[in-house]
Image (spheres, grey):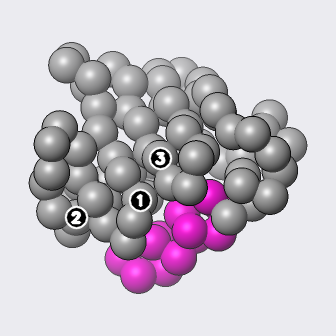
């Protein structure tokens, strides 16, 4: 499933979390979703409910999750954030 995800959707959510979320210890938080980036901004990260996504240049990304149910809840949450923009 992870090869078929639209990275643009996650980048939009990342930007929304950075813009509208509140800053905590090195990350931004909006609706229980964390977003942060590395020092040079090359990699962006989104995390929710034991799922972490790393967004990289050239349309590449990595997903770390234990099961499909967690991934599905992560995707639903990202879609909710994008609808609330």
What secondary structure predominates along the stretch shown in magenta? helix
Task: Give the residue number, with chain letter if any, for mark 3.
Answer: 47
CB contact under 8 Å: marks 2 and 1: yes
Q: Secondary structure at mark 2?
A: loop
Q: Residue 12: image x %, image y %?
A: 43, 56
| Corner quadrant of residue 77 | bottom right
Q: Residue at x 62, y 58 (%)?
A: 74
Q: Residue 83: image x %, image y %?
A: 49, 79
Question: Residue 21, which numbered label?
Answer: 2
**In the figure, 65 relative to 8: above or below?**
above
Compared across the picture, whether 28 is left or right of 80 comes to left
* Mark 1 nearby-residue class (10 Å; few <14, some 14–19, many ≥20): many
Q: Nearer the viewer, residue 10 or 53?
A: 53
CB contact under 8 Å: marks 3 and 2: no
Can residue 73 be seen at all in this image of the molecule?
yes
Q: Check if residue 72 falls in the magenta segment.
A: no
Which of pointers 1 and 3 lies earlier in the amino acid sequence? 1
Region in magenta: 74-85
Can residue 4 be seen at all in this image of the molecule?
no
Question: Residue 33, which numbered label?
Answer: 1
Q: CA distance from mark 3 to mark 2?
A: 13 Å
Q: Residue 79: image x %, image y %?
A: 57, 70
Q: Residue at x 71, y 55 (%)?
A: 70
């Amino acid at each position: 499933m992870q090869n078929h995800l639209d990275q643009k959707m996650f980048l939009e959510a990342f930007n929304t979390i950075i813009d509208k979320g509140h800053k905590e210890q090195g990350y931004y938080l909006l609706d229980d979703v964390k977003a942060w980036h590395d020092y040079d901004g090359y990699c962006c990260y989104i995390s929710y409910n034991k799922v972490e996504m790393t967004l990289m240049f050239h349309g590449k990304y990595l997903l770390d999750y234990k099961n499909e149910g967690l991934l599905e809840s992560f995707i639903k949450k990202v879609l909710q954030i994008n609808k609330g923009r």
